[in-house]
Image: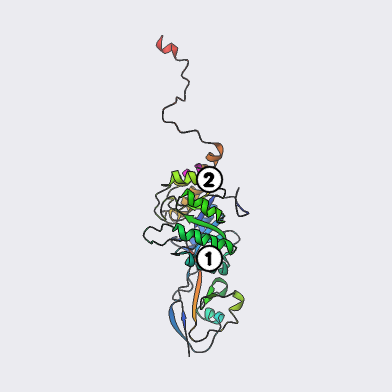
């Protein structure tokens, strides 16, 4: 079981709620994923379409909400969004995202570290989205982050875990859970992160934009379980030269 | 006549209303919306008793899908 800030999760697959074609598809896919924690964003109400309340389909007793600060470009915007999320009944957990560049959506390490410290002091459980920088992971942990969320590749790119060497170091050093977030585009990517020892993965785009989001959610659930099982079972070491699987002895009769 | 800025748009109100009355008139469920009035986040218990004054700047925010 995974524990973050005292809360336990049976599923190591966290899911996002963006980009789904309809609230009904989202609800079906998230249920099929077995995910217990889902991210949500905060936006102005569209006064020209006030009935468009997609969150109403998600039962709060079934899904634990992890509000994000997506869209924040600096620490003060992120803190403002986190406080709005808390007032919206989103609880005091926050996925901290500070992404100043809309083209890459890469996280700003300086502003993320500053906002982590400020939000931790204000009583938030902070899970910062971060570039896969092992030193930054330690800094965020020291600032009180409840988990760290290094990116596999940029948000929405479906490129997989391009940062695997850095993520491996983060996992090796971290005292808090490591959640690989962003860029996980296929179940094999999720399994790879879990085999490396990630505590969880967060997937949104790959499920939401799949041809059949419900089946893709199930595929991700299996991949995350398989990857975790493999990690716990202990993978064999990688080698640079071949090593026969069949005995080398006992072939004398072929050459006599 | 009272003029407020709600979610960036100028809005005329015939009479003074509370934040909660405005939300309901806009078709919103106050339970699901958070209000920030002149930069200060309101507690839900304040919605019914907070009247919108001329020139008020109100932001109505809610959860949407996101990753």
Q: Which of the marked residues, 2 or 1, is nearer the chain's N terminus?
A: 1
Indicate whether residue A195 is drawn in magenta.
Answer: yes
Looking at the image, is B22 positioned above or below residue A189? below
Q: Where is residue B37 in the image (x, y as percent from the top left)?
A: 52, 78
- Which numbered disc covers residue A82? 1
Q: Is mark 1 on a helix, strand or loop?
A: helix
Q: In which quarter of the image is the C terminus of chain A?
A: top left
Question: Residue A125: image x %, image y %?
Answer: 58, 59
Residue at 49% x, 42% y is: A196
Say which chain tag 2 marks.
Answer: A
| Residue B32, percent from left and from top | 55, 71
Confirm whether residue B58 shows in the render.
yes
The residue under label 2 is A173
| Residue extending furthest toward the bottom | B1
Evaluate whether residue A25 shows in this view: no
Residues at marks 2 and 1, common chain?
yes
SS at circle 2: helix
A62 sits left or right of A256 in the view: right
Seen in the picture, residue A70 relative to B40 is either above or below; the reply is above
Q: Mark 1 lies on which chain?
A: A
Discs 2, 1 touching: Cβ within 8 Å: no
Question: Observer-nearest residue: A126 or B4?
Answer: A126
Residue mark closest to the camera, 2 vs 1: 2
Answer left or right for A141 relative to A252: right
Give how far apart the Cα atoms at labels 2 and 1 are.
28 Å
Which residue is the extreme one toward the left? A103
Q: Position of residue B36 (x, y in %)?
A: 52, 75
Magenta residues, start to end:
A191-196
Q: Which residue, as the protein is rendered here, is positioned at the far right?
A: A6
Camera-nearest residue between A186 and A74: A74
């Amino acid at each position: 079981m995974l524990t973050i800030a005292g809360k336990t999760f049976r599923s190591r697959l966290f899911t996002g709620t963006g980009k789904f074609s309809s609230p009904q598809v989202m609800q079906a896919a998230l249920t099929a994923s077995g995910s217990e924690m889902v991210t949500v964003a905060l936006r102005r109400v569209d006064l020209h379409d006030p009935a468009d309340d997609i969150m109403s389909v998600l039962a709060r007793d079934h899904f634990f909400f992890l509000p994000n600060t997506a869209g924040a470009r600096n620490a003060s915007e992120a803190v403002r969004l986190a406080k709005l999320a808390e007032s919206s009944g989103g609880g005091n957990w926050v996925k901290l995202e500070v992404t100043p560049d809309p083209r890459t959506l890469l996280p700003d390490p300086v502003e993320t570290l500053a906002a982590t410290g400020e939000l931790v002091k204000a009583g938030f459980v902070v899970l910062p989205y971060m570039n896969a920088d092992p030193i930054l992971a330690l800094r965020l942990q020291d600032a009180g982050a409840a988990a760290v969320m290094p990116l596999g590749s940029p948000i929405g790119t479906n490129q997989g875990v391009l940062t695997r060497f850095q993520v491996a170091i983060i996992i090796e050093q971290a005292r808090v859970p490591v959640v690989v977030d962003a860029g996980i585009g296929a179940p094999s990517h999720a399994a790879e992160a879990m085999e490396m020892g990630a505590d969880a993965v967060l997937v949104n785009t790959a499920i939401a934009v799949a041809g059949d989001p419900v089946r893709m959610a199930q595929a991700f659930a299996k991949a995350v379980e398989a990857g975790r099982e493999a990690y716990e079972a202990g993978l064999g070491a990688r080698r640079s030269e071949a090593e026969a699987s069949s005995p080398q002895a006992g072939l004398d009769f072929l050459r006599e | 006549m009272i003029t407020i800025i709600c979610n960036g748009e100028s809005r005329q109100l015939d009479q003074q209303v509370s934040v909660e009355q405005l939300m309901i008139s806009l078709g919103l469920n106050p339970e699901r919306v958070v209000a920030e009035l002149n930069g200060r986040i309101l507690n839900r218990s304040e919605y019914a008793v907070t009247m919108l004054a001329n020139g008020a700047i109100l932001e109505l925010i809610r959860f949407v899908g996101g990753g």
